[in-house]
Image: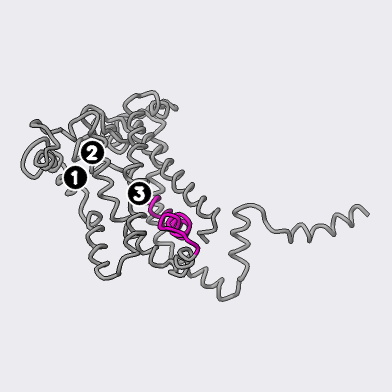
Amino acid sequence: MNRSRTLSSVPQALASPPTSWWGRRRAQAHKFDTPQSKGDRRLGLILIIPAAVILAVFIIYPLIEAVDYSFLNWDGIGPKTSAGLSNYTALWSNPVERQSLEHAGILICFYSLIPTALGLMAAALIARLPQRGMGVLRVIYFLPQVLVTIVVAVVWTWILAPGGSGTLNSLLHTFGLSGNVGTPWLGSFSDALIAVGLVAVWLDFGLCFVLFLSGVQRIPTSLYDAARVDGAGIIREFWLITVPMMRREIGVALTITIVASLQSFTLIYQATLGGPGTATTVPGLLVYRDAFQLGTVGAASALGVALALLTFVFTFVIRALLERKGELA
């Protein structure tokens, strides 16, 4: 009797819905399988083979090699010796590398959080205005994204110079907000990182604004009309309608800008070269210095692997939060 009861319970166990994330994905994918859909799936797999090969050769293989190098002491030419975990422990024990990671965390605020917040508020306000001339605004705000980063860095280096016509200091001096000696914005130990961060805000604001403006325009106006009938003001509309309805766009903006902040190199290399001292050093700059100037390929690889892991963690967390809210399929 026990055997028959066990066998009779097998179909019920097999029919129970999968509990794991991967099981739910497979069940959803095969729910509406037809011969045509299976053929389309095979065709899709064939079509992605070239892209998969390129991904494997130029992304996956170098990443595996970088992980291998991160456990070695190697100058890029001579013999290799095992370093164990010393290259990874140096990320925290070495004050310069630890400081660069701290700077990367600070720059996330300037590259990602501030532009996202400002872009969201600006898009919500401008969407309430007449639509005439909206295309011009998009072009103006998005223009910094079109410019090459090295050009942006050169221009802002001129603007933030201690003296000279057309600089920020000369403008402040005109309005009586600065003394006779101009502030060295990029040469000050206390102001350099903030100055670079504000340039990053200007650089990424346009991208966030364009993303959010498109998202705001797809929100049904009936929701705002109903909220106004209930007595909601502009602030309550923003928090109760705009933000929840634009969760997908916010996730995209956060992902793009956080990745950009962790990979920041060109702006800082041209504007400050990590100086003064180590006031603006970032991981990307140290990877370049360790690999190509100091010849410590293992240390550079360990820092690069750590950056890749941080990028993956941030991307995974943002996507997981969106999926939990039911925003992604």
On residue 153, the disc is 1
Q: Are marks 2 and 1 in contact (CB under 8 Å)?
A: no
Can you name the residue that lies furthest to the left here?
165
Q: What residue type is labelled 3?
A: Thr
Query: Is 235 within the magenta?
Result: yes
- The segment highlighted magenta reads 230-256
Q: Identify residue for label 2.
A: 195
C-alpha gap between disc 2 and disc 1? 11 Å
| Nearest to the observer: residue 218 or residue 322 | 218
The x and y percentages for residue 259 are 36, 47
136 with respect to 87 (left or right): left
Helix, strand or loop for disc 1: helix
Within 10 Å of the Cα at label 3, are there few (<14), some (14-19), or many (20+) other Cα atoms? many
Q: Identify residue for label 3.
A: 257
Count of marks, rendered view: 3
Query: Is 67 within the magenta?
Result: no
202 with respect to 87 (left or right): left
Q: What residue type is labelled 1?
A: Ala
The x and y percentages for residue 241 are 46, 60
